[in-house]
Image (cartoon, rainbow, N blue to C red):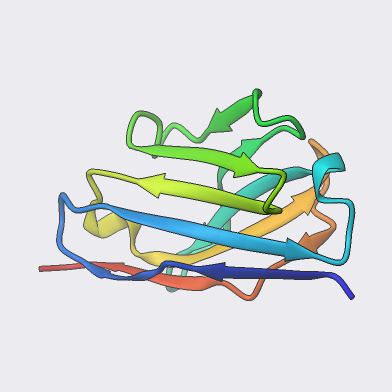
């Protein structure tokens, strides 16, 4: 049974930091690209970042570049999103996904991140 379970969300003040984690099971984790997406209230889901199978290749959206960093630990079957200098517009439900470079085959249930003073 495939599972992706996100954790680490919460309420943080503007300028603060959070580290999201996603724990995978039920599939060959080290053969998949891992990605983070987010969906803010009333908006479509948007791509945030991806990391290749070996953890070397990464890509971040322009809106988070320089503030967020994606990484993975294949031994632990986990992917992370370090989020620094958070802004109110980063408020969203954050989802991790597994797939190829172009596809998203598996999804987690999401974790809420709220940036507010």
* Furthest-left residue in this view: 117
Q: Position of residue 115 (x, y in %)?
A: 24, 64
Image quarter in which the N terminus is found: bottom right
Q: In front: 74, or 15? A: 74
Image quarter in which the C terminus is found: bottom left
Whether 36 is drawn above or below 69: the answer is: below
Q: Residue at x 65, y 63 (%)?
A: 23
Q: In front: 46, or 64? A: 64
Q: In front: 61, or 80? A: 80
Picture quarter containing residue 55?
top right
* Furthest-front residue in this view: 75
Q: How many marks?
A: 0
Q: In front: 95, or 74? A: 74
Q: Position of residue 2 (x, y in %)?
A: 85, 70
Whether 24 is drawn above or below 30: the answer is: below
Q: Position of residue 109 (x, y in %)?
A: 63, 76
Q: Residue at x 52, y 59 (%)?
A: 21
Q: Position of residue 89 (x, y in %)?
A: 29, 56
Whether 106 is drawn above or below 61: the answer is: below
* Furthest-top residue in this view: 56
Locate residue 107 relative to residue 96 in the image: left or right.
Answer: right
Q: Residue at x 60, y 50 (%)?
A: 79
């Amino acid at each position: 049974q495939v599972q992706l379970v996100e954790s680490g969300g919460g309420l943080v003040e503007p300028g603060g930091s959070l580290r999201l984690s996603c724990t995978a099971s039920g599939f060959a984790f080290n053969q998949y690209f891992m990605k983070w997406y987010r969906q803010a209230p009333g908006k479509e889901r948007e791509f945030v970042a991806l990391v290749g199978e070996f953890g070397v290749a990464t890509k971040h959206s322009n809106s988070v570049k320089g503030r967020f960093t994606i990484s993975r630990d294949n031994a632990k079957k986990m992917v992370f999103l370090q989020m620094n200098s958070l802004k109110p517009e980063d408020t969203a439900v954050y989802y991790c996904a597994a797939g190829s470079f172009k596809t998203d085959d598996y999804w987690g249930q999401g974790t809420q991140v709220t940036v507010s003073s």
